[in-house]
Each structure stands twice: as C-alpha cells, then as structure tokens.
Amino acid sequence: MKLDKIVCHCKRVTNGDIKTAVEQGARTFAEVQEKTGVGRGCKRCIDAATRVMEDCIEELQA
C-alpha cells in the first residue's frame, strides 16, 4: 500500500494517516474519522477509506 496516496481529497487524508490512526487504536470508521477527518467533506471516499482501515486492522492482527 502506498502510504502517501490520498484517500480523502477534501481533507487531504492519506493511506498513511489512516494506518497511523489504526496503529493508535482506532478500530471503527468513526474512530478513524475522529482522528483524521476522513469522510467529512463530500463523503465519496468513505468506501475506499473503510477498505484501507480494514486492511490496516488485518495487518496488525496478523
């Protein structure tokens, strides 16, 4: 996963930002959203951001 890839253009949130939020304990989309602001603009990124979050959680649990 490219950590510098922007997932949320409205808030300029990257894959790396989401990964960091997960590493800091976020386990729900609402928690990731609180830490990063992802999905608070046009909301078009929610599906992609959720997939990134789930991948990061899986990676931590492996």
Image (cartoon, grey):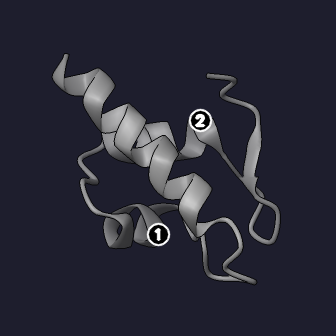
Nearer to the camera, 19 or 46: 46
Residue drawn at 59 percent across, 35 percent down: 16
Judge whether 53 appears above or below 58 on screen: below
Q: Is residue 57 left or right of residue 33?
A: left
Answer with mark 2 or mark 1, whichever residue precedes in sequence: 2
Q: In the image, what residue type sits under mark 1?
A: Gln
Q: Which residue is mark 2?
A: 16
What residue is at 61 percent from the left and 22 percent from the top?
Answer: 1
The answer to which quarter of the image holds residue 41 is bottom right
Query: Where residue 60 sits in the image (x, y, percent)?
Result: 25, 25
Number of other residues with Cα within 10 Å of mark 2, as a class: few under 14, some 14 to 19, many 20 or more: some
Instruction: Identify the residue at the far left of this view.
Output: 61
Side of 6 relative to 40 (left or right): right
Q: Is residue 4 above or below residue 13?
A: above
Instruction: List x then y, in percent, for residue 59.
Output: 31, 22
> Does the residue at mark 2 contact the one at mark 1 (Cβ under 8 Å)?
no
Mark number, residue 33:
1
- Residue 55 is tagged as none
